[in-house]
Amino acid sequence: MRSLSLIALLLFIMVALKSIHGYITHWFFGRATSADEAKEWEMLTPVKNDDGSWSFKSRYGKWLSASNQIDGFIYVTFVSKNNLCKVCEDWRLDSW
């Protein structure tokens, strides 16, 4: 019974990710922007992938994604899980 409680607890963990500009939030049309405070819109569900990387799902069911664009900038957005650019939604976390 104890292991079931632990599994249930792990299913409901949510995190807020903070950059130098503020907390990452899921805005309209999959756009990622920043917020000064971490409220319910900034909370993401972490999902550990089989390869040890992590993915982060928003309350809208979209995945945090980052990719290089033609203009040379890296854009952070929220997308449906995308097998063509799987690495765009998979994140490696360093120990700190």
Image (cartoon, helix red, strand yellow):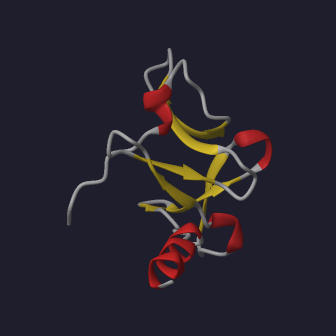
Q: Is residue 93 left or right of residue 91?
A: left
Tell which of 91 and 35 is nearer to you.
91
In the image, what residue occupies the spot 61% across and 40% down? 77
The answer to whether residue 60 is visible is: yes
Tell which of 85 and 26 is nearer to you.
85
In the image, what residue occupies the spot 47% across and 32% down? 88
Quarter of the picture containing the C terminus is bottom left
Q: Is residue 66 above or below residue 22?
A: above
The image position of residue 87, as x and y in percent, is 43, 30
Q: Is residue 8 above or below residue 82?
A: below
The image position of residue 9, as x and y in percent, is 54, 77
In the image, what residue occupies the spot 47% across and 78% down? 6
Q: Is residue 77 left or right of residue 67?
A: right
The answer to whether residue 74 is visible is: no
Tell which of 50 and 36 is nearer to you.
50
Residue 25: quadrant of the picture:
bottom right
The image position of residue 31, as x and y in percent, is 69, 43
